[in-house]
Amino acid sequence: MLLNEKAWYEINNVDQLDSPALVIYADRVKKNIQTLINNVSHIDQLRPHVKTHKCIEATELMILAGINKFKCATIAEAEMLAMSKSKDVLLAYQPNRPKMKRFIKLIEKYPTTKFSCLVDHIAIAEQLADAAQKNGITISVYLDLNVGMNRTGIAPENAFQLCKKIAELPSLSFMGLHAYDGHIDETDFVKRTHECMEIYNRVLGLKEMLVANGFEKVELIMGGSPSFPIYAQLKDVECSPGTFVYWDGNYQNSLPEQNFLPAALVVGRIISMPSPELLTVDIGHKSISSEYELSRRVRFLNAPDLHAVSHSEEHLVLKAPENHSYQMGDVLYALPSHICPTCALYEHAVSIKDRELDKIWKIVARDRKIGV
């Protein structure tokens, strides 16, 4: 960077922004979407997860770029996608009875959007089939596979009979298989590729068995951000990264082979200086994700020499070097380690255009309920 040249994140009229605030650099979001598209052979391979951004504006940018299929985890996220006029929405969650009622209302309220959901147990599949039949609709379902995360799903090797039973139920349409590999955190790309291909071969074995036994259509939806570049090379797999849209500090460090740009920051200010070497900023637990250990929660792009000492609901205390020049009110640009839960802490974000505050992006799906 040239002397006196501003860094990419600096906002000219930042004095008009109260802090803490979530800011979104829209041009970088667009670049990340294009980078995503450039990494697949056909755009239909993409089914991005919207858990990160949870907002209509980011969804519309993806739709404008030609992405028509999406994945989500909550009814509110599914409704946000329907409000955005998304064509194809997978609720990547097995619904219980109350959620089934809401899911069916969603299907009825937005008839131009194709909805589907996950199942991994015959009891839930039977309840869903019964509810669909009573409401005169057919619900598309994917079988959720447990490929090592041990959070939800059934092992591929044990899933054949369950697939058959689900396919025989009235008012359900069996679409295929869903496998999320969030337990894979290998930073070495070669090793990560090996782990992903082991999973793919297990899932592919189940698919081939189903096809051999008369299943006409078995779609595969697999992976998240770490495994995206691996599954993207396989033409028969839909990929579901989510964090790519904003990126964050954790993935920037652990997935260096992926060329996405940080596009969302938390803006804070120094609000107290309790000792010569301690600074307090207004970025507490309620402003930035805090599930990582203290030293990894945030990195200040314009103040890399500051290190976290303590973190509470409304305050983050930082240690500064001796004879530092920081002053009360200084603006700090914070890159969160985990952007997804950070976004969920804010009712809205402010988009940045040409270094100026631009529009409000309401994070509408941070709520558990929108309309349905």
Image (cartoon, grey):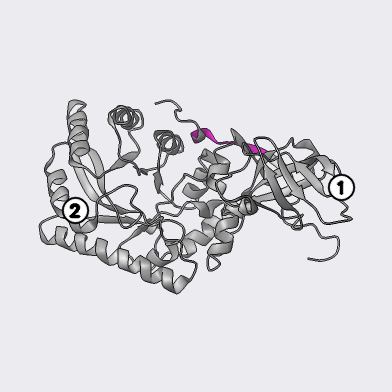
Q: Which residue is mark 2?
A: 159
Q: Nearer the viewer, residue 22 or 305?
A: 305
Relative image position of residue 86 (x, y in whole percent) = 41, 42
Instruction: Identify the magenta region.
Output: 359-365
Residue drawn at (30%, 41%) of the image: 117
Amino acid at dot 1: Pro
Residue drawn at (80%, 53%) of the image: 320
Q: CA distance from mark 1 to mark 2?
A: 62 Å
Circle 2 — which element?
loop
Amino acid at dot 2: Ala
Relative image position of residue 149 (x, y in whole percent) = 36, 54
Q: Which mark, residue 276?
A: 1
Q: Quadrant of residue 108?
A: top left
Tell me if 40 is positioned left or right of 262 in this view.
left
Q: Which mark, residue 22?
A: none
Which mark sits nearer the N-terminus, 1 or 2? 2
